[in-house]
Amino acid sequence: MTSSKVTPRDDGGLQGASDGVELYIRTYYSLLRTTGEVRVRAFEEAHAFSDSTLHLGAHDVVPDVAAFAYAAARLPSCMASIERIILGQSHEQFETIGLEVRDWAEVRTRGRRRPLRYDGDKTLAVFLTSTSDLDDLIPIVTAYQIEWNKLHERLAHTALGRAIARTEEGDSLSIDDAELATLLGLDAAGVATLRAGLGDGIDRGLRAIVSRECDLRLRVLSTTYTGYQRAAHRWWSGIEPAYVRDAPRKRPPLYFVSSNTHSILNLCGGYARTHRESIIDFVRRKNPERLAEVVESALENRDEDTLSNLTYYLLRAWLHESDVDTRSLLQQVQDFDAQSGVRTVPSPGKVDVSAQLVDLAALKPERLDPRVRVDGIELLAQSDAVVLNIDYPLGMAAYHLLTRLVQGASDMLGVYVMGKAATLNGRVGDVMLSDTVFDEHSRNRYMFRNAFSAGDLEPFMRRGTVLDGQKALTVRSAFLQNRAYMADYYRDGYTVLEMEAGPYLSAVFELAFPDRHPSGSIVHLSNAVPFELGVVHYASDTPYSRRQELLSKSLSYFGVESTYGCASAILRRIFTREVARVRASRGQRPDKP
Protein backbone atom coordinates (compact mmCIF):
# COMPACT_ATOMS: atom_id res chain seq x y z
CA MET A 1 0.00 0.00 0.00
CA THR A 2 1.21 3.50 -0.79
CA SER A 3 2.71 5.32 2.16
CA SER A 4 0.66 8.07 3.73
CA LYS A 5 3.79 10.25 3.90
CA VAL A 6 3.08 11.38 7.45
CA THR A 7 5.53 13.97 8.73
CA PRO A 8 5.36 14.22 12.53
CA ARG A 9 5.26 17.30 14.75
CA ASP A 10 3.82 19.73 12.26
CA ASP A 11 1.31 22.45 13.02
CA GLY A 12 0.67 23.32 9.40
CA GLY A 13 2.98 26.31 9.70
CA LEU A 14 0.40 27.99 11.91
CA GLN A 15 0.54 29.49 15.37
CA GLY A 16 -2.82 28.00 16.40
CA ALA A 17 -5.55 29.65 18.38
CA SER A 18 -4.87 32.95 20.11
CA ASP A 19 -4.04 33.05 23.81
CA GLY A 20 -7.55 34.30 24.60
CA VAL A 21 -9.26 31.46 22.77
CA GLU A 22 -6.93 28.85 24.29
CA LEU A 23 -7.58 30.27 27.78
CA TYR A 24 -11.33 30.10 27.19
CA ILE A 25 -11.18 26.44 26.10
CA ARG A 26 -9.02 25.47 29.06
CA THR A 27 -11.34 27.36 31.42
CA TYR A 28 -14.57 25.61 30.53
CA TYR A 29 -13.04 22.14 30.20
CA SER A 30 -11.37 22.42 33.61
CA LEU A 31 -14.52 23.73 35.29
CA LEU A 32 -16.76 21.11 33.73
CA ARG A 33 -14.68 18.28 35.21
CA THR A 34 -16.62 18.71 38.45
CA THR A 35 -19.40 16.25 39.22
CA GLY A 36 -21.63 19.09 40.37
CA GLU A 37 -23.22 22.04 38.62
CA VAL A 38 -21.26 25.04 37.32
CA ARG A 39 -22.76 28.49 36.94
CA VAL A 40 -22.38 29.86 33.43
CA ARG A 41 -21.19 33.13 34.98
CA ALA A 42 -17.91 31.29 35.67
CA PHE A 43 -17.23 31.27 31.90
CA GLU A 44 -18.18 34.89 31.20
CA GLU A 45 -14.81 36.57 31.80
CA ALA A 46 -12.86 34.09 29.67
CA HIS A 47 -15.59 34.26 27.00
CA ALA A 48 -15.35 38.06 26.78
CA PHE A 49 -11.54 37.99 26.87
CA SER A 50 -11.46 35.66 23.84
CA ASP A 51 -12.72 38.57 21.67
CA SER A 52 -14.77 36.22 19.49
CA THR A 53 -15.69 37.61 16.08
CA LEU A 54 -19.24 36.48 16.80
CA HIS A 55 -19.37 38.44 20.04
CA LEU A 56 -17.36 41.62 19.60
CA GLY A 57 -19.77 43.49 21.88
CA ALA A 58 -19.27 41.19 24.87
CA HIS A 59 -17.47 43.96 26.81
CA ASP A 60 -19.94 46.71 25.88
CA VAL A 61 -22.82 47.91 28.03
CA VAL A 62 -25.00 48.19 24.93
CA PRO A 63 -26.58 44.81 24.14
CA ASP A 64 -24.95 42.93 21.27
CA VAL A 65 -28.25 41.78 19.78
CA ALA A 66 -26.54 40.14 16.81
CA ALA A 67 -24.67 37.77 19.14
CA PHE A 68 -27.84 37.24 21.18
CA ALA A 69 -29.83 36.42 18.03
CA TYR A 70 -27.16 33.98 16.84
CA ALA A 71 -27.17 32.20 20.20
CA ALA A 72 -30.96 32.23 20.60
CA ALA A 73 -31.43 30.67 17.17
CA ARG A 74 -29.28 27.73 18.30
CA LEU A 75 -31.20 27.18 21.53
CA PRO A 76 -34.79 25.94 21.89
CA SER A 77 -37.73 28.34 22.28
CA CYS A 78 -38.26 27.07 25.84
CA MET A 79 -34.89 28.61 26.77
CA ALA A 80 -36.61 31.59 28.39
CA SER A 81 -37.79 29.22 31.15
CA ILE A 82 -34.58 27.20 31.56
CA GLU A 83 -32.41 27.49 34.65
CA ARG A 84 -30.48 24.22 34.48
CA ILE A 85 -28.85 22.40 31.54
CA ILE A 86 -27.68 18.80 31.93
CA LEU A 87 -25.43 17.31 29.24
CA GLY A 88 -24.92 13.57 28.79
CA GLN A 89 -24.30 10.83 26.25
CA SER A 90 -27.21 8.42 26.84
CA HIS A 91 -30.61 7.96 28.45
CA GLU A 92 -29.00 5.69 31.00
CA GLN A 93 -26.66 8.45 32.16
CA PHE A 94 -29.55 10.79 32.81
CA GLU A 95 -31.50 8.06 34.59
CA THR A 96 -28.63 7.40 37.02
CA ILE A 97 -29.21 10.91 38.45
CA GLY A 98 -32.99 10.47 38.50
CA LEU A 99 -33.93 12.21 35.24
CA GLU A 100 -36.39 10.13 33.16
CA VAL A 101 -35.67 12.04 29.99
CA ARG A 102 -37.37 9.41 27.81
CA ASP A 103 -40.66 10.92 28.99
CA TRP A 104 -39.62 14.54 28.41
CA ALA A 105 -40.71 16.58 25.41
CA GLU A 106 -38.43 16.66 22.37
CA VAL A 107 -37.52 20.24 21.49
CA ARG A 108 -35.61 21.68 18.56
CA THR A 109 -33.76 24.82 17.57
CA ARG A 110 -33.88 26.89 14.40
CA GLY A 111 -30.14 26.93 13.75
CA ARG A 112 -28.62 23.72 15.10
CA ARG A 113 -29.53 20.03 15.01
CA ARG A 114 -28.96 18.50 18.44
CA PRO A 115 -31.07 16.00 20.45
CA LEU A 116 -32.74 17.99 23.24
CA ARG A 117 -35.34 17.08 25.89
CA TYR A 118 -37.34 19.52 28.04
CA ASP A 119 -39.00 18.62 31.34
CA GLY A 120 -41.70 21.26 30.89
CA ASP A 121 -40.35 23.32 33.79
CA LYS A 122 -36.79 24.60 34.19
CA THR A 123 -34.47 21.80 33.02
CA LEU A 124 -33.07 21.06 29.57
CA ALA A 125 -31.29 17.78 28.75
CA VAL A 126 -28.72 17.84 25.93
CA PHE A 127 -27.40 14.67 24.29
CA LEU A 128 -23.74 14.89 23.30
CA THR A 129 -22.55 13.09 20.17
CA SER A 130 -18.96 14.37 20.23
CA THR A 131 -16.67 16.85 21.95
CA SER A 132 -17.75 19.39 19.33
CA ASP A 133 -21.11 19.67 21.06
CA LEU A 134 -19.34 21.07 24.11
CA ASP A 135 -17.16 23.44 22.08
CA ASP A 136 -20.24 24.64 20.25
CA LEU A 137 -22.77 24.84 23.08
CA ILE A 138 -20.74 26.40 25.91
CA PRO A 139 -19.95 29.66 24.03
CA ILE A 140 -23.53 29.82 22.71
CA VAL A 141 -25.04 29.54 26.20
CA THR A 142 -22.51 31.98 27.65
CA ALA A 143 -23.15 34.62 24.96
CA TYR A 144 -26.89 34.14 25.47
CA GLN A 145 -26.62 34.77 29.21
CA ILE A 146 -24.30 37.79 28.88
CA GLU A 147 -26.62 39.54 26.43
CA TRP A 148 -29.83 38.49 28.23
CA ASN A 149 -28.57 40.23 31.36
CA LYS A 150 -27.67 43.39 29.45
CA LEU A 151 -31.21 43.47 28.08
CA HIS A 152 -32.63 42.87 31.56
CA GLU A 153 -30.55 45.66 33.07
CA ARG A 154 -31.78 48.16 30.49
CA LEU A 155 -35.46 47.17 30.59
CA ALA A 156 -36.34 45.90 34.05
CA HIS A 157 -36.73 49.23 35.87
CA THR A 158 -38.33 51.26 33.09
CA ALA A 159 -41.98 52.09 32.52
CA LEU A 160 -41.96 49.85 29.44
CA GLY A 161 -40.41 47.03 31.43
CA ARG A 162 -43.03 47.32 34.17
CA ALA A 163 -45.79 47.35 31.55
CA ILE A 164 -44.38 44.21 29.94
CA ALA A 165 -44.17 42.49 33.36
CA ARG A 166 -47.83 43.28 34.12
CA THR A 167 -49.19 41.54 31.01
CA GLU A 168 -50.59 38.07 31.51
CA GLU A 169 -49.14 34.98 29.86
CA GLY A 170 -50.87 34.56 26.52
CA ASP A 171 -51.62 38.26 26.10
CA SER A 172 -50.08 39.88 23.06
CA LEU A 173 -47.52 42.61 23.70
CA SER A 174 -47.83 45.89 21.84
CA ILE A 175 -44.39 47.47 21.92
CA ASP A 176 -43.26 50.63 20.17
CA ASP A 177 -40.02 49.75 18.39
CA ALA A 178 -38.73 53.33 18.64
CA GLU A 179 -39.13 53.32 22.42
CA LEU A 180 -37.48 49.91 22.65
CA ALA A 181 -34.58 51.12 20.50
CA THR A 182 -34.05 54.16 22.72
CA LEU A 183 -34.03 52.14 25.94
CA LEU A 184 -31.65 49.52 24.56
CA GLY A 185 -29.35 51.92 22.72
CA LEU A 186 -30.10 50.29 19.37
CA ASP A 187 -31.09 51.43 15.92
CA ALA A 188 -34.08 50.09 13.99
CA ALA A 189 -32.01 47.28 12.49
CA GLY A 190 -30.91 46.25 15.98
CA VAL A 191 -34.51 45.99 17.18
CA ALA A 192 -35.38 43.92 14.11
CA THR A 193 -32.44 41.62 14.92
CA LEU A 194 -33.66 41.23 18.50
CA ARG A 195 -37.15 40.35 17.30
CA ALA A 196 -35.68 37.82 14.86
CA GLY A 197 -33.59 36.32 17.66
CA LEU A 198 -36.61 35.80 19.91
CA GLY A 199 -38.57 34.37 16.98
CA ASP A 200 -42.15 33.28 17.52
CA GLY A 201 -41.63 33.47 21.28
CA ILE A 202 -40.89 37.20 21.39
CA ASP A 203 -43.69 38.00 23.88
CA ARG A 204 -42.69 35.21 26.23
CA GLY A 205 -39.00 36.05 25.81
CA LEU A 206 -39.39 39.75 26.63
CA ARG A 207 -41.51 38.96 29.69
CA ALA A 208 -38.84 36.57 30.93
CA ILE A 209 -36.01 39.03 30.20
CA VAL A 210 -37.78 41.78 32.14
CA SER A 211 -38.72 39.54 35.06
CA ARG A 212 -35.33 38.04 36.00
CA GLU A 213 -31.64 37.91 35.45
CA CYS A 214 -30.30 34.86 33.63
CA ASP A 215 -28.26 32.63 35.95
CA LEU A 216 -27.90 29.33 34.11
CA ARG A 217 -26.27 26.28 35.64
CA LEU A 218 -24.54 23.53 33.68
CA ARG A 219 -23.70 19.97 34.57
CA VAL A 220 -21.82 17.57 32.30
CA LEU A 221 -22.29 13.91 33.15
CA SER A 222 -19.34 11.60 32.60
CA THR A 223 -18.29 11.69 28.93
CA THR A 224 -16.03 9.12 27.29
CA TYR A 225 -14.66 8.38 23.84
CA THR A 226 -16.41 5.00 24.09
CA GLY A 227 -19.68 6.77 24.77
CA TYR A 228 -19.38 8.76 21.57
CA GLN A 229 -18.56 5.57 19.67
CA ARG A 230 -21.61 3.89 21.23
CA ALA A 231 -23.84 6.73 20.01
CA ALA A 232 -22.39 6.28 16.50
CA HIS A 233 -23.14 2.56 16.74
CA ARG A 234 -26.80 3.29 17.64
CA TRP A 235 -26.97 5.63 14.66
CA TRP A 236 -25.65 3.04 12.23
CA SER A 237 -27.95 0.37 13.71
CA GLY A 238 -30.88 2.54 12.63
CA ILE A 239 -29.59 2.77 9.05
CA GLU A 240 -28.25 -0.75 8.52
CA PRO A 241 -31.62 -2.53 8.05
CA ALA A 242 -32.49 -0.18 5.17
CA TYR A 243 -29.00 -0.54 3.70
CA VAL A 244 -29.02 -4.37 3.63
CA ARG A 245 -32.75 -4.78 2.98
CA ASP A 246 -32.44 -6.25 -0.50
CA ALA A 247 -28.96 -7.76 -0.21
CA PRO A 248 -28.39 -9.11 3.32
CA ARG A 249 -25.58 -11.45 2.25
CA LYS A 250 -23.64 -9.19 -0.11
CA ARG A 251 -23.81 -5.60 1.02
CA PRO A 252 -23.98 -3.04 -1.80
CA PRO A 253 -20.94 -0.94 -2.75
CA LEU A 254 -21.32 2.53 -1.32
CA TYR A 255 -20.88 6.16 -2.31
CA PHE A 256 -20.93 8.29 0.85
CA VAL A 257 -22.20 11.88 0.75
CA SER A 258 -22.43 14.36 3.60
CA SER A 259 -24.67 17.26 2.61
CA ASN A 260 -28.22 18.04 3.75
CA THR A 261 -31.66 16.45 3.70
CA HIS A 262 -33.09 18.28 0.71
CA SER A 263 -30.62 18.72 -2.18
CA ILE A 264 -29.92 15.07 -3.11
CA LEU A 265 -33.57 14.21 -2.49
CA ASN A 266 -34.92 16.95 -4.76
CA LEU A 267 -32.43 16.30 -7.54
CA CYS A 268 -33.14 12.55 -7.56
CA GLY A 269 -36.67 12.11 -6.21
CA GLY A 270 -38.59 14.44 -8.49
CA TYR A 271 -41.51 15.27 -6.17
CA ALA A 272 -41.07 19.03 -6.45
CA ARG A 273 -40.61 18.87 -10.21
CA THR A 274 -43.76 16.74 -10.58
CA HIS A 275 -45.76 19.28 -8.56
CA ARG A 276 -44.17 22.35 -10.12
CA GLU A 277 -47.40 23.88 -11.44
CA SER A 278 -49.07 23.72 -8.03
CA ILE A 279 -46.01 25.28 -6.39
CA ILE A 280 -45.91 28.09 -8.97
CA ASP A 281 -49.63 28.74 -8.40
CA PHE A 282 -48.93 28.96 -4.65
CA VAL A 283 -46.13 31.48 -5.27
CA ARG A 284 -48.40 33.64 -7.42
CA ARG A 285 -51.06 33.67 -4.70
CA LYS A 286 -48.89 34.09 -1.62
CA ASN A 287 -45.68 35.67 -2.97
CA PRO A 288 -43.49 34.20 -0.19
CA GLU A 289 -40.30 36.22 0.37
CA ARG A 290 -41.38 38.33 -2.63
CA LEU A 291 -40.21 35.63 -5.01
CA ALA A 292 -43.20 35.73 -7.38
CA GLU A 293 -41.40 38.19 -9.65
CA VAL A 294 -38.33 35.93 -9.76
CA VAL A 295 -40.53 32.98 -10.71
CA GLU A 296 -42.23 34.92 -13.52
CA SER A 297 -38.86 36.08 -14.85
CA ALA A 298 -37.55 32.50 -14.88
CA LEU A 299 -40.68 31.33 -16.71
CA GLU A 300 -40.41 34.13 -19.27
CA ASN A 301 -36.72 33.43 -19.91
CA ARG A 302 -37.19 29.65 -19.85
CA ASP A 303 -34.52 29.51 -17.18
CA GLU A 304 -34.84 25.87 -16.14
CA ASP A 305 -32.09 25.90 -13.49
CA THR A 306 -33.45 28.93 -11.64
CA LEU A 307 -37.00 27.61 -11.87
CA SER A 308 -35.94 24.25 -10.45
CA ASN A 309 -34.03 25.93 -7.62
CA LEU A 310 -37.07 28.07 -6.79
CA THR A 311 -39.34 25.04 -6.85
CA TYR A 312 -37.07 23.14 -4.47
CA TYR A 313 -36.70 26.11 -2.15
CA LEU A 314 -40.45 26.78 -1.94
CA LEU A 315 -41.54 23.16 -1.64
CA ARG A 316 -41.61 23.24 2.17
CA ALA A 317 -43.75 26.41 2.28
CA TRP A 318 -46.16 24.89 -0.26
CA LEU A 319 -46.46 21.70 1.77
CA HIS A 320 -47.19 23.66 4.94
CA GLU A 321 -50.06 25.44 3.20
CA SER A 322 -51.75 22.13 2.38
CA ASP A 323 -54.97 21.16 4.19
CA VAL A 324 -53.78 17.56 4.36
CA ASP A 325 -52.60 16.27 7.76
CA THR A 326 -48.85 16.87 8.09
CA ARG A 327 -48.02 13.24 8.85
CA SER A 328 -50.15 11.98 5.98
CA LEU A 329 -48.57 14.47 3.58
CA LEU A 330 -45.06 13.56 4.72
CA GLN A 331 -45.83 9.89 4.14
CA GLN A 332 -47.13 10.74 0.67
CA VAL A 333 -43.88 12.53 -0.17
CA GLN A 334 -41.76 9.68 1.22
CA ASP A 335 -43.77 7.10 -0.76
CA PHE A 336 -43.17 9.10 -3.95
CA ASP A 337 -39.46 9.36 -3.18
CA ALA A 338 -39.26 5.61 -2.48
CA GLN A 339 -40.73 4.93 -5.91
CA SER A 340 -37.91 7.08 -7.29
CA GLY A 341 -35.30 4.99 -5.45
CA VAL A 342 -34.75 7.27 -2.43
CA ARG A 343 -35.48 6.08 1.12
CA THR A 344 -35.18 8.33 4.17
CA VAL A 345 -34.19 7.20 7.68
CA PRO A 346 -35.01 10.13 10.02
CA SER A 347 -32.84 10.54 13.14
CA PRO A 348 -31.61 6.92 13.29
CA GLY A 349 -30.73 5.68 16.76
CA LYS A 350 -32.13 8.92 18.24
CA VAL A 351 -29.07 10.74 16.85
CA ASP A 352 -30.27 13.85 15.03
CA VAL A 353 -28.41 13.11 11.79
CA SER A 354 -30.92 11.84 9.23
CA ALA A 355 -29.88 9.58 6.36
CA GLN A 356 -31.05 8.89 2.82
CA LEU A 357 -30.31 5.80 0.77
CA VAL A 358 -30.38 6.20 -3.01
CA ASP A 359 -30.68 2.89 -4.84
CA LEU A 360 -29.00 3.73 -8.15
CA ALA A 361 -30.71 0.87 -10.00
CA ALA A 362 -34.14 2.13 -8.94
CA LEU A 363 -33.70 5.73 -10.07
CA LYS A 364 -36.17 6.95 -12.69
CA PRO A 365 -34.22 8.99 -15.27
CA GLU A 366 -37.32 10.97 -16.26
CA ARG A 367 -37.66 12.24 -12.67
CA LEU A 368 -34.05 13.36 -12.36
CA ASP A 369 -33.14 17.03 -12.52
CA PRO A 370 -31.69 17.66 -16.03
CA ARG A 371 -28.46 18.90 -14.46
CA VAL A 372 -27.59 15.43 -13.17
CA ARG A 373 -28.53 13.39 -16.26
CA VAL A 374 -25.20 12.19 -17.63
CA ASP A 375 -24.48 10.22 -20.79
CA GLY A 376 -25.41 6.58 -20.31
CA ILE A 377 -27.69 7.32 -17.33
CA GLU A 378 -29.91 4.41 -18.37
CA LEU A 379 -27.08 2.01 -17.45
CA LEU A 380 -27.62 2.81 -13.78
CA ALA A 381 -30.50 0.33 -13.93
CA GLN A 382 -27.79 -2.37 -13.88
CA SER A 383 -25.92 -0.89 -10.91
CA ASP A 384 -25.56 -2.71 -7.58
CA ALA A 385 -24.39 0.40 -5.70
CA VAL A 386 -26.16 2.81 -3.38
CA VAL A 387 -25.56 6.41 -2.34
CA LEU A 388 -25.78 7.07 1.39
CA ASN A 389 -26.40 10.76 2.03
CA ILE A 390 -26.39 12.04 5.62
CA ASP A 391 -27.43 15.39 7.05
CA TYR A 392 -23.97 16.74 7.80
CA PRO A 393 -23.08 16.26 11.48
CA LEU A 394 -21.38 18.77 13.74
CA GLY A 395 -17.59 18.70 14.05
CA MET A 396 -16.12 15.55 15.56
CA ALA A 397 -19.42 13.68 15.19
CA ALA A 398 -18.43 13.40 11.51
CA TYR A 399 -15.40 11.32 12.50
CA HIS A 400 -17.38 8.99 14.76
CA LEU A 401 -20.21 8.42 12.27
CA LEU A 402 -18.03 7.77 9.23
CA THR A 403 -15.68 5.38 11.07
CA ARG A 404 -18.70 3.41 12.34
CA LEU A 405 -20.42 3.42 8.96
CA VAL A 406 -17.56 1.79 7.13
CA GLN A 407 -17.48 -1.07 9.63
CA GLY A 408 -20.91 -2.14 8.38
CA ALA A 409 -20.63 -1.13 4.73
CA SER A 410 -19.20 -2.95 1.74
CA ASP A 411 -16.73 -1.46 -0.75
CA MET A 412 -16.40 2.31 -0.40
CA LEU A 413 -16.42 3.85 -3.88
CA GLY A 414 -16.29 7.52 -2.96
CA VAL A 415 -16.53 10.01 -0.10
CA TYR A 416 -17.97 13.44 -0.90
CA VAL A 417 -18.32 16.19 1.70
CA MET A 418 -20.45 19.27 1.05
CA GLY A 419 -21.06 21.98 3.63
CA LYS A 420 -21.33 25.62 4.58
CA ALA A 421 -18.27 27.67 5.45
CA ALA A 422 -17.03 31.17 6.12
CA THR A 423 -14.79 32.63 3.44
CA LEU A 424 -11.98 35.09 4.06
CA ASN A 425 -11.52 36.04 0.41
CA GLY A 426 -14.85 35.48 -1.34
CA ARG A 427 -18.51 36.48 -1.06
CA VAL A 428 -21.61 34.85 0.34
CA GLY A 429 -22.85 32.34 -2.24
CA ASP A 430 -19.41 31.54 -3.66
CA VAL A 431 -18.17 27.94 -3.80
CA MET A 432 -14.74 26.98 -2.45
CA LEU A 433 -12.80 23.83 -3.37
CA SER A 434 -9.89 22.98 -1.07
CA ASP A 435 -7.04 20.52 -1.42
CA THR A 436 -5.45 21.29 1.96
CA VAL A 437 -7.23 21.16 5.32
CA PHE A 438 -5.74 22.07 8.69
CA ASP A 439 -7.74 20.34 11.43
CA GLU A 440 -7.77 21.97 14.87
CA HIS A 441 -8.90 18.71 16.50
CA SER A 442 -5.96 16.55 15.39
CA ARG A 443 -3.58 19.44 14.58
CA ASN A 444 -2.95 17.65 11.28
CA ARG A 445 -2.52 19.31 7.92
CA TYR A 446 -4.22 17.04 5.40
CA MET A 447 -3.27 17.29 1.74
CA PHE A 448 -5.35 15.41 -0.83
CA ARG A 449 -6.47 15.33 -4.44
CA ASN A 450 -9.92 16.92 -4.58
CA ALA A 451 -12.22 15.19 -7.07
CA PHE A 452 -13.67 18.58 -8.08
CA SER A 453 -12.26 21.58 -9.88
CA ALA A 454 -13.82 24.91 -10.80
CA GLY A 455 -14.95 23.57 -14.17
CA ASP A 456 -17.20 21.01 -12.49
CA LEU A 457 -19.19 23.71 -10.69
CA GLU A 458 -19.10 26.72 -13.01
CA PRO A 459 -21.91 25.51 -15.34
CA PHE A 460 -24.33 25.69 -12.39
CA MET A 461 -23.24 29.09 -11.01
CA ARG A 462 -24.48 32.42 -12.33
CA ARG A 463 -24.21 34.69 -9.31
CA GLY A 464 -21.45 33.08 -7.31
CA THR A 465 -17.80 32.44 -8.15
CA VAL A 466 -16.10 29.05 -7.90
CA LEU A 467 -12.68 29.17 -6.22
CA ASP A 468 -10.55 26.03 -6.37
CA GLY A 469 -7.05 25.49 -5.02
CA GLN A 470 -8.14 26.81 -1.60
CA LYS A 471 -6.94 25.85 1.89
CA ALA A 472 -9.51 25.14 4.61
CA LEU A 473 -9.34 25.45 8.37
CA THR A 474 -11.54 23.13 10.44
CA VAL A 475 -12.38 25.10 13.59
CA ARG A 476 -13.66 23.73 16.90
CA SER A 477 -16.54 26.19 17.07
CA ALA A 478 -17.84 29.25 15.26
CA PHE A 479 -17.33 31.25 18.48
CA LEU A 480 -13.77 30.04 19.13
CA GLN A 481 -12.02 32.41 16.77
CA ASN A 482 -11.16 36.10 16.71
CA ARG A 483 -9.75 38.56 14.20
CA ALA A 484 -6.12 38.11 15.22
CA TYR A 485 -6.58 34.36 15.10
CA MET A 486 -8.10 34.44 11.62
CA ALA A 487 -5.45 36.87 10.40
CA ASP A 488 -2.72 34.39 11.34
CA TYR A 489 -4.35 31.68 9.26
CA TYR A 490 -5.09 34.06 6.40
CA ARG A 491 -1.42 34.97 6.19
CA ASP A 492 -0.69 31.27 5.74
CA GLY A 493 -3.19 31.07 2.86
CA TYR A 494 -6.15 29.55 4.71
CA THR A 495 -9.32 31.13 3.32
CA VAL A 496 -12.10 28.66 4.22
CA LEU A 497 -13.35 28.24 7.81
CA GLU A 498 -15.63 25.26 8.49
CA MET A 499 -16.28 22.47 11.02
CA GLU A 500 -16.44 19.01 9.41
CA ALA A 501 -13.72 18.43 6.79
CA GLY A 502 -10.90 17.74 9.28
CA PRO A 503 -12.79 15.04 11.24
CA TYR A 504 -13.90 13.43 7.98
CA LEU A 505 -10.32 13.35 6.73
CA SER A 506 -9.17 11.79 10.02
CA ALA A 507 -11.76 9.06 9.40
CA VAL A 508 -10.62 8.71 5.76
CA PHE A 509 -7.05 8.15 6.98
CA GLU A 510 -8.26 5.23 9.09
CA LEU A 511 -10.13 3.76 6.12
CA ALA A 512 -6.89 3.63 4.15
CA PHE A 513 -4.32 2.66 6.80
CA PRO A 514 -4.04 0.21 9.70
CA ASP A 515 -3.37 2.93 12.28
CA ARG A 516 -5.40 5.58 14.02
CA HIS A 517 -4.91 9.02 12.53
CA PRO A 518 -1.78 10.83 13.76
CA SER A 519 -1.69 14.22 15.46
CA GLY A 520 0.37 17.31 14.72
CA SER A 521 1.50 15.97 11.36
CA ILE A 522 1.49 16.68 7.64
CA VAL A 523 -0.58 13.89 6.08
CA HIS A 524 -0.48 13.31 2.32
CA LEU A 525 -3.62 11.41 1.27
CA SER A 526 -3.45 12.01 -2.48
CA ASN A 527 -2.00 8.63 -3.50
CA ALA A 528 -3.12 6.64 -0.49
CA VAL A 529 -6.91 6.62 -0.42
CA PRO A 530 -8.42 3.72 -2.42
CA PHE A 531 -11.57 5.65 -3.33
CA GLU A 532 -12.40 9.09 -4.71
CA LEU A 533 -12.48 12.02 -2.29
CA GLY A 534 -14.30 15.30 -2.92
CA VAL A 535 -14.76 18.32 -0.65
CA VAL A 536 -16.92 21.33 -1.59
CA HIS A 537 -18.04 24.28 0.53
CA TYR A 538 -20.38 27.14 -0.20
CA ALA A 539 -19.90 30.45 1.56
CA SER A 540 -22.47 31.45 4.19
CA ASP A 541 -20.42 34.14 5.91
CA THR A 542 -17.71 36.72 5.24
CA PRO A 543 -16.34 37.46 8.72
CA TYR A 544 -13.70 39.94 7.55
CA SER A 545 -16.13 42.25 5.81
CA ARG A 546 -19.71 41.76 6.93
CA ARG A 547 -20.05 40.25 10.38
CA GLN A 548 -23.85 40.31 10.27
CA GLU A 549 -24.07 37.65 7.57
CA LEU A 550 -23.52 34.68 9.89
CA LEU A 551 -25.09 36.30 12.93
CA SER A 552 -28.41 37.55 11.69
CA LYS A 553 -28.99 36.59 8.08
CA SER A 554 -29.62 33.16 6.64
CA LEU A 555 -28.56 32.30 3.12
CA SER A 556 -32.25 32.23 2.22
CA TYR A 557 -32.97 31.91 -1.52
CA PHE A 558 -29.62 33.52 -2.39
CA GLY A 559 -27.85 30.37 -1.16
CA VAL A 560 -29.94 27.94 -3.19
CA GLU A 561 -27.84 28.31 -6.34
CA SER A 562 -24.61 27.30 -4.64
CA THR A 563 -26.30 24.52 -2.64
CA TYR A 564 -27.78 22.86 -5.71
CA GLY A 565 -24.71 23.61 -7.80
CA CYS A 566 -22.57 21.66 -5.31
CA ALA A 567 -25.09 18.82 -5.04
CA SER A 568 -25.43 18.60 -8.83
CA ALA A 569 -21.67 18.33 -9.27
CA ILE A 570 -21.48 15.56 -6.66
CA LEU A 571 -24.30 13.54 -8.24
CA ARG A 572 -22.90 13.97 -11.75
CA ARG A 573 -19.55 12.71 -10.49
CA ILE A 574 -21.15 9.67 -8.84
CA PHE A 575 -23.41 8.87 -11.82
CA THR A 576 -20.55 9.23 -14.33
CA ARG A 577 -18.27 6.96 -12.32
CA GLU A 578 -20.99 4.38 -11.79
CA VAL A 579 -21.91 4.31 -15.49
CA ALA A 580 -18.21 3.65 -16.23
CA ARG A 581 -18.16 0.93 -13.54
CA VAL A 582 -21.23 -0.79 -15.05
CA ARG A 583 -19.67 -0.68 -18.53
CA ALA A 584 -16.43 -2.13 -17.17
CA SER A 585 -18.32 -4.98 -15.49
CA ARG A 586 -19.88 -5.81 -18.88
CA GLY A 587 -16.50 -5.85 -20.58
CA GLN A 588 -17.10 -2.54 -22.34
CA ARG A 589 -14.47 0.16 -22.50
CA PRO A 590 -15.34 2.63 -19.74
CA ASP A 591 -15.40 6.32 -20.52
CA LYS A 592 -13.07 8.39 -18.38
CA PRO A 593 -15.10 10.10 -15.60
Image (cartoon, grey):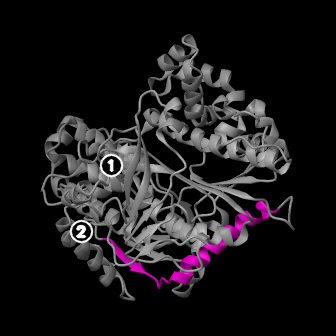
Viewed as shown, does residue 562 lie left or right of 316? left
**Badges 1 and 2: C-beta atoms under 8 Å apart?**
no
Q: Taking 143 as reference, is 285 above or below it?
A: above
Residue 85, percent from left and from top: 41, 72
Residue 496, percent from left and from top: 36, 51
> In the drawing, what numbered circle is on residue 15?
2
Majority secondary structure of the magenta segment? helix
Give the magenta-colored segment's residue range: 216-244
Residue 440, percent from left and from top: 36, 68
Residue 179 visible to an observer of this rendering: yes
Amino acid at dot 1: Thr
Q: Residues within 10 Å of mark 1 (few under 14, many from 20)?
A: few
- Pick the residue in front: 264 or 584: 584
Q: Taking 12 as reference, is 582 above or below it?
A: above
Q: Quadrant of residue 553?
A: top left
Q: Quadrant of residue 568?
A: top right
- Which residue is drawn at the image coordinates 62% and 19% (left, top)? 281
